[in-house]
Amino acid sequence: MKVLVLYQPHSEHRIAVEELVREYKQLYPGSMIEVLDVEQEDGTAMAKLYGIMRYPSLMVLRDDGSMVQSWEGESELPRPEDIIYYASSNL
């Protein structure tokens, strides 16, 4: 499984995303979380691939790239416990 965050680092939601990523890494140091800037080529490509329309966006992806769960928008950011639930499940 892969946890991916797409966000705009020069926006109002920057602090919320960075706090979530920091907390997630503290609680689950063995689990990776990839952070991409949607203003960069990689981030833009991922947003387009998954049809992401609102930022920040957090996705849990299977190894084959299929989506397990996603959350879009600052008000929808999940708790670290919710992220690890999907990232460690066999859904």
Image (cartoon, rainbow, N blue to C red):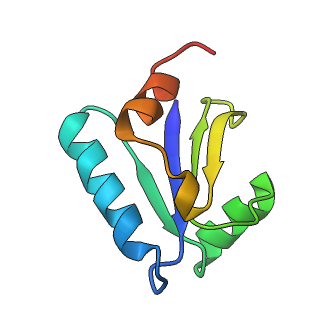
**Left or right: 44 as drawn, with respect to 14:** right
Between 29 and 53, the residue placed more toward the observer is: 53
Does the image show residue 63? yes
Residue lying at 63% horizontally and 76% vertically, measured from the top left:
41
Seen as rendered, the residue at the extreme front is 75
In the rendered view, tell whether residue 66 sits above or below residue 72. above
**Left or right: 19 as drawn, with respect to 34:** left
Q: Quadrant of the C terminus?
A: top right
In the rendered view, tell whether residue 58 sits above or below residue 28. below
Seen as rendered, the residue at the extreme top is 90
Q: Position of residue 2 (x, y in %)?
A: 51, 37
Q: Position of residue 47 (x, y in %)?
A: 71, 63
Between 3 and 75, the residue placed more toward the observer is: 75
Seen as rendered, the residue at the extreme bottom is 10
Residue lying at 35% horizontally and 72% vertically, measured from the top left:
15
**Left or right: 57 as drawn, with respect to 27:** right
In the rendered view, tell whether residue 12 sits above or below residue 33. below
**Left or right: 84 as drawn, with respect to 25:** right
Quadrant hosting residue 40: bottom right
Q: Position of residue 45 (x, y in %)?
A: 71, 66
